[in-house]
Image: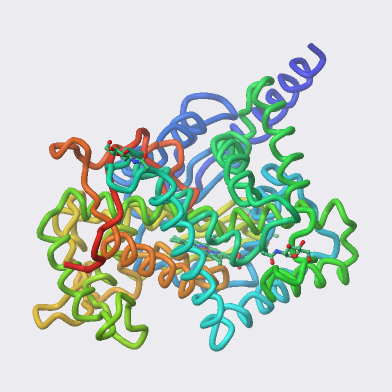
Amino acid sequence: MIWTILLLFHGILFFFFLSNRTRSKREPPLDKGVIPWLGHALDFGKDAAKFLTRMKLKHGDIFTVRVAGRYVTILLDPNSYDAVLQDTTSLDFTRYAQVLMDRIFNLKLPNHKPDSEKSIMRRHFQGESLTCLNHAMQNHLWTLLTFETTAQNQTNWKQDGLFGFCYSLLFRAGYLTLFGGEQKNNCMDAANVYMEYQKFDSLLIKMAHTTLKSGEKQTAGSVKQRLWELLAQAGLRDNSSLWLQSYRQHLKEEGADEETQRKAMLLQLWATQGNVGPATFWLLAFLLTHSEAMRAMRKEFNSATMPGTITLDPQQHTPVFDSVLEETLRLTAVPFITREVLQNKTLHMADGQEYDVRRGDRVCLFPFVSPQMDPEIHHEPEKFKYDRFLNADGTAKRDFFKGGRRLKYYTMPWGAGTNACVGKPFAIQSIRQFVFLVLSHLDIELSDPEAQVPAVDASRYGFGMLQPIEELQIRYKLRERPCVQ
Ligand code: HEM
Ligand SMILES: *[C@@H]1O[C@H](CO)[C@@H](O)[C@H](O)[C@H]1NC(C)=O
Ligand SMILES: *[C@@H]1O[C@H](CO)[C@@H](O)[C@H](O)[C@H]1NC(C)=O
Ligand SMILES: *[C@@H]1O[C@H](CO)[C@@H](O)[C@H](O)[C@H]1NC(C)=O
């Protein structure tokens, strides 16, 4: 009861403080919504893509909305994105990230130095180190996939949901690669972590929005507790990746205690394992429902196979795969790129317009609405076209235009600027390797040949890879003679 009163009191305070904000001439169009304080929070949370598309029609490429007491300026012109991405003095990335870190992972890092963390990660995810990680990942994928298919009666088809199939295999392989081997006498370690992680993931959006119901709060608490325990030794064993070992060492040097270190392990588990499985699901779902794309993919893999083996030649370019992946991510990778305004600032748009944004507000890019789903940039944007990112001569297509200008950002699944994805090359190689293994070693088909790619869970807009609202049923079995065709 006391909380309700306090909340109400806060709400009223905020209402008086903020509701009388008016737009000045040099500021973007202001849309406060009709609900005091909350503003557009409900629409935003329910389906951010739909809400922001509606606002874009009403106000254009830049506008300010009120969301739960905060004023957020949304910028939707990709030609102007650099005005936000390149300013790291007035616009800050870490503050909002820290808010989310606390809400989702209960994590407050003392003396947090994001730059040195990132440079540790960069060092371990390129060059020789990356080659080693790719090898380890490939071996784990292979072992898990053959175990999965031979554990059951080999001659029979096995039924499964494609999302669970992809996510579970890639998650476990990624966990073994980066977080380290099994604990003593417990070969179910990776599977346990995956199971607990699924429960955590299903509550993640509500944790971020602080909208957990009281029962869910308890579940979230105990699931996190279990994951912290399962991850207690991560980065301390010598079969954890060198990256995780250095990262854990770095946390110690920053003065993080044992408990904080475990919480940071869960954050890294999410950052490294949360996107690859869902991305691969969408990619295979599109291939299984688009026969022309599947044919092109098989043809390319066939010619990129090392002679006399069933392994992908790492030296070979795979432009068809690259285009299929780019197209998949264009439709299903939906990050928000958020910055906190540290001091009043003028945004210079590509068309010459200037807008002031106020200190304390947030600026947010939403590349899903534009460039990714912008009909001016991508013809029939809602359709999957496997060759959208290919030129007529089969090379990668990089020329896309809006308003007569060639775009630097024509799709942005990996984020951009200072906080762009550090794991991109590792992620791409993991997905390529997995898709190759599946297509060459399994007979795989839709259980219902007429089935369509399932709809997306709209509440996940803004949190990286989307997930489907329901499973896509498949059946598969190990091929007697592996081959790509
Ligand atoms: C399909 C797979 C993936 C997608 C679509 C993806 C996408 C992204 C995006 C959009 C961001 C920026 C987040 C933001 O703006 O706050 C990001 C950050 C990051 N990603 Fe990925 N990612 C993927 C896989 C991976 C993998 C496999 C790893 C590591 C092994 C990884 C490591 C990271 C890290 C450490 C950051 C944080 C960078 C920073 O904050 O400075 N990602 N990723
Ligand atoms: C596999 O399934 C086939 C057909 O259902 C059956 O005849 C055979 O005995 C099974 N083999 C094993 C090892 O279960
Ligand atoms: C990983 O290391 C731990 C402890 O150092 C050990 O108990 C475990 O057996 C190792 N796992 C593998 C797969 O090597
Ligand atoms: C920032 O802008 C707001 C609104 O235009 C103004 O009220 C405020 O005084 C400015 N602050 C500074 C430090 O210039």
Q: Is 104 situated left or right of 474 in this image?
A: right
82 to 107, vertically: above or below: below
List x then y, in percent, for residue 247.
74, 70
**Quadrant showing the N terminus:** top right
Count of numbered marks? 0
Q: Place residue 163 in its image quadrant.
A: top left
Can residue 310 be seen here? The reply is yes
Q: Is 226 situated left or right of 353 in this image?
A: right
**Quadrant showing the C terminus:** bottom left
Residue furthest top in the image: 1
132 to 172, vertically: above or below: below
Which residue is more in the foreground, 218 or 402? 218
Q: Residue at horizontal 88%, vertical 71%?
A: 253
Q: Residue at horizontal 20%, vertical 75%?
A: 302
Can residue 26 be seen here? The reply is no
9 to 374, vertically: above or below: above
Which residue is more in the foreground, 475 or 106? 475
Which residue is more in the foreground, 73 or 267? 267
Q: Place residue 304 in its image quadrant.
A: bottom left
Which residue is more in the foreground, 1 or 297? 297
List x then y, in percent, for residue 437.
34, 65
Q: Residue at horizontal 73%, vertical 56%?
A: 183
